[in-house]
Amino acid sequence: MMVAVAAMSVVGCSDAWDDHYKNTPESVSQQTLWQAINSREDLKPFAQLLLANGYDKNLDANQRFTVWAPEGDINTTLLTGQQMTDEEVLTQIVENHMARSIWAQASVTEDTVTMLNGKSIALEGTTFNKVPIVEKNIPCSNGILHIISHQVDFNHNLWTYMRQDNDLTDVTNYLYSFNRSVFSPELSTEGGVVNGEKYYTDSVFVTTNDLWSSIGYLNNESQNYDMLMPTNAAWEAKVAEFASYYKYKNIDEVENSEKYAERNLVNYLVYNNSSKEERPAYMDQNIVATIPCSNGKMLKTDDLAIEPLETFVEPLIVEAEGSANILEVNSAASSRVNVNVANTGLSNSSYMVLTHTSSIKKPSVVVALPNVLSCKYDIGVVMVPVNMTKYGYSSSVDQKKMRLNFELRDANSGTTEKFSKLEYEGTKVDTVWVKKGHEFPYCDYYPSKEVKNAAVTLTITSDAGSRDTQYSRDLYIDCVVLKPTK
């Protein structure tokens, strides 16, 4: 199959090869590409890289390759001063100088070659990616060899470029910390079966990253992203700002503040240009440099304009009819009503009803408010008119007001606040604002904690007595909403 693919991919270039050599078969060397490269003193550094990465075997086999071998020393140092990893050496140097099939070079050549690393490189006359070819079309038994004056530059994608800039090391180190090595059976060489299990004579591991699936596959050459990259100072400042929303009471949990801040921040750095979602305005603010990459643009900034209240600090909506959120009920009966008509204004198209009796004159409910952040919220309760039914509003039921008491408890700060005799007109689905701009000094953000253990609760109680005939003594509650505010 490889031979067939190679044969199909050499149209044009292989014709030049065949025309040049068809009458002089004796001119085709019996040396393999590896033997030809390894025999030359001026190619020793490149030969050592090939050997270290196992490509001596590839270039000594029957597969056909074209190699542009650089003379002299090879630079394996990143612009940051760090040494390349083994994988970076393989991708950015070794596979950046090799292509499958035959690519003969003539003075009039104008073509684009796909290298083994997937990059496209231009052939123009007697240059390879603008690097002079000092010896061309050296025939070998399994391909063709060109000698170039020095190693060619690597055309970085977003993922590889970020490792090249000393101003970007903080965010780069964070993103790269999610790298992991995964065994690839497709790229490995099977050795047979022992005791019913496959074994491999050559096991290949590839690098993947646990963030790519959520923020974007930044190493994918077929994508087109714009990526905000904050300088170290900008990253540090924005992480500190985000972390202020994750202030924990327990000193042992301080590290979680930075962890959640960093994880949230990277969610807003990448925009997929094929997305139908509106491009955020902050993507184009405070840009100090635009770096073109093979799969998009890197937008370098020294001041991230991402606002917490416009991104990760979102309203919290706690459904009153959700059993997991209800910690305690004091009612003759409680029921969930599902409304089958649209445009009622109800959250989740359902609400809870708490009824009274002579023994339970003032029904009440304790609602858990999980995952509040350390910031200010407008706290409200969305109430439902008594003439609302599952079929919508009923004309046969009289509308009534409700008079309500609230108690807000915060176990983290050890505070309890009471709000008495707040009224709801009862003519439409509407919000009774318990308190505007309430500040939680500590967050209670625990994604895996059970709701019943939430530190913040709101108790809702009907305040209407038997003589208050203009008020409903029952409670009709849609949800509790916490709206972040400055």
Image: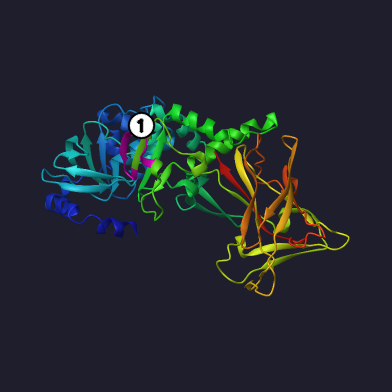
- Along the viewing direction, whichever of 413 and 437 lies nearer the viewer: 437
Residue 52 appears in view: no
Q: Would residue 384 be counted in the magenta stretch?
A: no
Q: In this view, does 338 lie above or below 128?
A: below
- The residue singled out by tag 1 in the image is 48
In percent of width and height, residue 390 lies at: 66, 71
Q: Which residue is at 70% across, 60% downward?
A: 401
| The C terminus: image quadrant | top right
Q: Is residue 366 above or below residue 156?
A: below
Q: What residue type is labelled 1?
A: Gln
Q: Is 94 left or right of 399, judged from the image as shown?
A: left
- Along the viewing direction, whichever of 126 and 477 lies nearer the viewer: 477
- Along the viewing direction, whichever of 163 and 334 lies nearer the viewer: 334
In percent of width and height, residue 210 lies at: 52, 45
The outermost residue toward the right is: 359
Q: Which residue is at 76% across, 62% downward?
A: 474
Q: Would residue 284 be counted in the magenta stretch?
A: yes
Q: What element carries label 1?
A: helix
How many neighbours does mark 1 have within 10 angstroms: few (below 14), some (14-19), or many (20 or more)?
A: some
Q: Which residue is at 34% across, 60% downward?
A: 1
Q: Is 109 left or right of 161, judged from the image as shown?
A: left
Q: Is 228 left or right of 316, judged from the image as shown?
A: left
The outermost residue toward the top is: 81
- Along the viewing direction, whichever of 80 and 11 lies nearer the viewer: 80
Q: Is residue 70 above or below residue 452?
A: above
Q: What stretch is highlighted in magenta?
A: 283-296
In percent of width and height, residue 97 lies at: 29, 40
Q: Is 54 left or right of 349, judged from the image as shown?
A: left
In percent of width and height, residue 370 lies at: 68, 46
